[in-house]
Amino acid sequence: MSHDFDRLYEKSRIDSTAFWTEAASHIKWLKPFASVLDDSRAPFVRWFSEALCNTSENCLDRHVAAGHGDRLALIYDSPVTGVVAKLTYGELLDRVSRFAGALKKLGVGKGDRVIIYMPMVPEAVIGMLACARLGAIHSVVFGGFAAHELASRIDDAKPKLILSASCGIEPTRIVAYKPLLDKALELARHQIDHAVILERPQSPVALVAPRDLDWRAVEAMGELTAPTPVLSTDPLYVLYTSGTTGQPKGIVRDNGGHMVALAWSMRNVYGVSPGDVFWAASDIGWVVGHSYIVYGPLLNGNTTILFEGKPVGTPDAAAYWRLINRHQVKVMFTAPTAIRAIKQQDPDCALLPDHDISSLAALYIAGERADPDTVHWANRHLGVPVVDHWWQTETGWPITGNCLGLGLYPIKVGSPGRAVPGYQVEVVDEAARPLPAGAQGSIVVKLPLPPGCLPTLWGNDQAFVDKYLTEFPGYYKTGDAGYLDDEGYLYVMSRTDDVINVAGHRLSTGALEEVLAGHPAVAECAVFGANDELKGQVPVGLVVLKAGVTANPGEVERQLIDRVRDDIGPVAAFRKVAIVKRLPKTRSGKILRGTLQKMANGDSYSIPPTIDDPAVLSELAGALATLGFVPAQA
Ligand code: COA
Ligand code: AMP
């Protein structure tokens, strides 16, 4: 075991005040904190309370003031446009500071919300940091979500302004964002003052005055603007994520605790020093993008990479190796699904030897369960540790994971490692009693959560308590199930709720069911996740039509697929739907989604004793077979 890891873990457990005070010394505070942890309003706890600070200042000004203005801050590498552009810390500060000035002129100030619906271009990062500079709260919405999802976030966040672009670029098509934004604004009850639109050469855009403004014209009117001091506990951003219903949850992130935790994780978890190149191949619409494309690397003085491309198809399965070589990446972060995509196209990794990846010290993976085959494949070909680690939008930084900066302890493939300093992870039964090693149960984190984790849900303190803190008193409920082994390694096996993970993207089956149920011909439906070789899981829908509906079943299925694409977005990858006569239910009327999932996965299953009619299952086996599944016998 790593000596440093054990020592620091114990310190974080026994004297968390000393541990986090030391970590906080890496951040510039404009007024020192009165207490490290304020639990006077528990379960609502606050880190570094009463301190004043500014996240954009810590990401930019601090490094420039220390003489590192010429160091590369951001590399934009976009195989879909053929552009590679670089911004130093000095240049990024200048653009962020001016853009903050421009937003200020448009009336954006401390506490105002700004939605960012943008592709992976530097302006998106500039927008995020400019909001942070003003103390405005950004809420980034992933570009793969459609108008309806965007509208629900607009209504919840009630932004003053939206930052967007004319289009995103997918390998096979241009995704025009402006029509999606216009439709979302039609659907939303809340109305905004302005939409600032970045016109990209790939797609011109028609601006509707006076609401729509041209990004470049707006940026040009900005003057250099000093960072606004905010309280450590003021929100930096809200990021919506899927829960059990169609209503997304607004995860709140504060300023002070977030900075301390992320800066600590860059040095200690990922083991990078200022000046090192760190690359998280994710999207700024996800938490990985927030934490490890934008805030973490910049807080730590690293060079970060904004990659507008895919692991395959832009143009080939060597895209990752090419970038590691070109930019001398030291540590990379991606999702297992991306490695599976590369492995599928280039099984022998024949494209790798053309690229010198000797700068790479480790590959970190997260976002979904890492199958051992994929880990072994990457490890064999890259020749560096492949480190699985586990976390969630809610926590904002790793809960468990091997820490390169503290000296790696032995890796056990299949486990995302041991609890990271700051977290106490346990596995409990339904009565919140800790279970012995090897026993499977609900994975929980002992309260209080460390800095950086969500202090609440946006505008809904009660839902925060109800969803996360009530079922297991004294613990935060992660929604994952699994077990710990006798050396404290965690094994994450499944979710305990309706969340599924499609190509590393978190989706709610409840949200998908709401969309299907909205079709006029649908009486009832069930959506569950089935195993998929590339994406980990894909959603599957089984639908019962209303009595008397005579529509062509194939036509209805096509409409349902289009409906999910239009309402939730292409990211749902919803392609498997079948119309069936009945759904399997318990005698009390609960749909047996777990049994359906086992059937689709070809897993053995037993007929639940509570089922109202076992014959339904054999009927459904046929429907699942038409979708390409091979159900096992009960
Ligand atoms: N804007 C608009 N559309 C988007 C989008 C975006 N930002 N991102 C994805 N989409 C669309 C895709 O074009 C695709 O549409 P299609 O149905 O017309 O083909 C759909 O959403 C699904 O996209 P994706 O999940 O990317 O699947 P894919 O089959 O195109 O590619 C992978 C498969 C494995 C290559 C891809 O999922 C991937 O790179 N995954 C990495 C995941 C990741 O980074 N997760 C973040 C957590 S670390
Ligand atoms: P998200 O909030 O989108 O980051 O998704 C978080 C969820 O993804 C977790 O609760 C897990 O279900 C899953 N997840 C993330 N990382 C891992 C991992 N390393 N192993 C297994 N599941 C993971």
Image (spheres, rainbow, N blue to C red):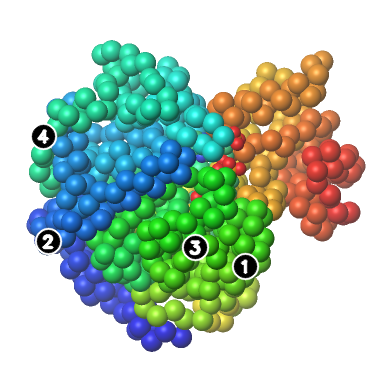
Q: Amino acid at mark 3?
A: His
Check the image and report above or below for 201 versus 620.
above
Q: Are marks 4 and 1 in contact (CB under 8 Å)?
A: no
Res 117 → quadrant: top left
473 or 200: nearer the viewer: 200
Q: CA distance from mark 3 to mark 4?
A: 43 Å
Q: Amino acid at mark 4?
A: Glu
The C terminus - image quarter? bottom right
Q: Nearer the viewer, mark 1 or mark 3?
A: 3
Relative to 53, is 343 on the left or the right?
right
Q: Amino acid at mark 2?
A: Gly
Check the image and report above or below for 188 versus 340.
above
- Residue at 44% x, 79% y: name it: 408
- Regarding residue 53, the answer to whether it shows in the image is no
Mark 2: secondary structure: helix
**Numbered label attached to residue 355:** 3
Q: Which of marks 4 and 3 precedes in the sequence?
A: 4
Mark 1: secondary structure: helix
Q: CA distance from mark 2 to mark 1?
A: 42 Å
**Numbered label attached to residue 223:** 4
Q: Which of marks 1 and 2 precedes in the sequence?
A: 2
Location of residue 312 in the rendering, given as x and y in whole percent from the top left corner: 57, 49
Q: CA distance from mark 2 to mark 3?
A: 33 Å
Q: Residues within 10 Å of mark 3 (few under 14, many from 20)?
A: some
